[in-house]
Amino acid sequence: MKLAILSRAPHSYSTRRLRAAAEERGHRVRVLNTLRFAIDLSGGEPDLQYRGKPLSDYDAILPRIGASITFFGMAVVRQFEQMDVYTPTTAAGIANSRDKLRSIQILSRHDIKIPATTFARDRADVLPAIERVGGAPVVIKLLEGTQGIGVILAPDTKVAEAVIETLQSTKQNVLIQRFIAESRGRDIRAFVIGDRVVAAMRRSAQGDEFRSNVHRGGTTEAVELDDEYQRVAVQSAQIMGLKVAGVDMLESDDGPMVMEVNSSPGLEGIEAASELDIAGAVVDYVANQVAFPELDVRQRLTVSTGYGVAELHIGDGSGMVGRTLADSGLRERDITVLTVTRGTRVVPNPRGSRALESGDRLLCFGRLEEMRDLVPARRRRRARPKVEPLPPEAVEELAASHEEPAPPLTEADTVTKDAP
């Protein structure tokens, strides 16, 4: 396999480990500076220039796209995808995960628990937003912060208002999240490759610091995750469109809550904690997938006039409950079922003998006119349960541990850094 690692930091731990792991396995590998590419759309096929010369053929890429070059990095990765070069980290996956608001919006539609979150722009909406997540204390986050930068714990409403007002005055967009008190100072980082968690570690903050990031002095220890934590981690990465990802979760009283899905997770902490060759596992996975470049199903399948992709919901009144796919009449209507989703389980390429149940969701490709009558009516929004604020004694205890309000971020604090 000929592999390119897209990285501006060839001497960082993660890049060095990936390169060494690839070379140990006999692969040809080069580290290419992402900013030295030029996208070439002048010919008949999509192409790339590197350092002013045509790029040679590669079987796969491993993007390590830093936050400061997200837009250009995604464009380069997208061009590789158009050239049918395999990448476990797609441009869409980077876009989904890099924007905290976007990632939470996507996850909130699926069976993934997240901390109660709001996003408000107008000053008049800030207080109601804080109340919607259960009241102070709240966590305030910059949308594109990394390594714990731009994450502030506001112990009371006045501090929260002051911080949000300061950030908004500098044209920063911020999220307001409920503070999960029982997980204070700790979180879980699950490293997902493909459809499994290959390693996980618990990160713990030091002293009064509530951010557990290793870059902020947090300590790590290897942990074994139960089935629910593993399911949530893998499903979150897949929903984001990532085959290699670091999924950060809080250990709440209600089970795992996803905070963030990282498209360019560092290897140093997870390899030290787990004592496993994570870099080697990444390279092995990529080598096994090079014949299957990521495809945009809708882009490829909808080029046929009158055909498209749709999701059909099987309800009690559909007439299909209890019938098999072969007897459902879908094939006769020129509709092919690609997957069946039942709860959190996805069955790809289902057999004709599979019986349908109420609540099943079928991802189908077929004639649009035939599917139009089967597409369900738009679902109505469900009423959300009210989020209860922390009890007064918990708020007082938290306030006591933060006697001095967190100072507003300086310009230096808000500068995002490249992923290692």
Image (cartoon, helix red, strand yellow):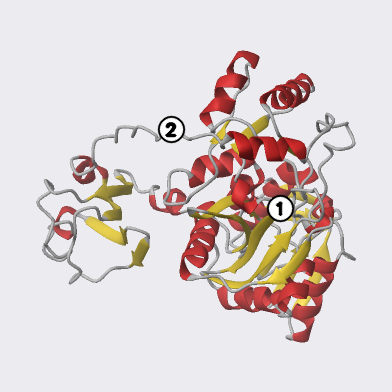
Which of marks 1 and 2 precedes in the sequence?
Answer: 1
Q: In what element is the residue under mark 1?
A: loop
Q: Residues within 10 Å of mark 1 (few under 14, many from 20)?
A: many
In this rendering, does residue 312 appear at all? yes
Residue 32 left/right relative to 110: right
Q: In terms of image quadrants, where is residue 89?
A: bottom right
Residue at x 88%, y 31% (from the top left corner): 410
**Looking at this view, is 209 or 410 the one in front?**
209
Q: Quadrant of the N terminus?
A: bottom right
Q: CA distance from mark 2 to mark 1?
A: 25 Å
Using the image, tell me which numbered label, if any, was put on residue 386.
2
Q: In what element is the residue under mark 2?
A: loop
What residue did someone put label 1 on? 185
Residue 265: image x %, image y %? 71, 60
Q: Amino acid at mark 2?
A: Lys
State whether residue 373 is above or below residue 298: above
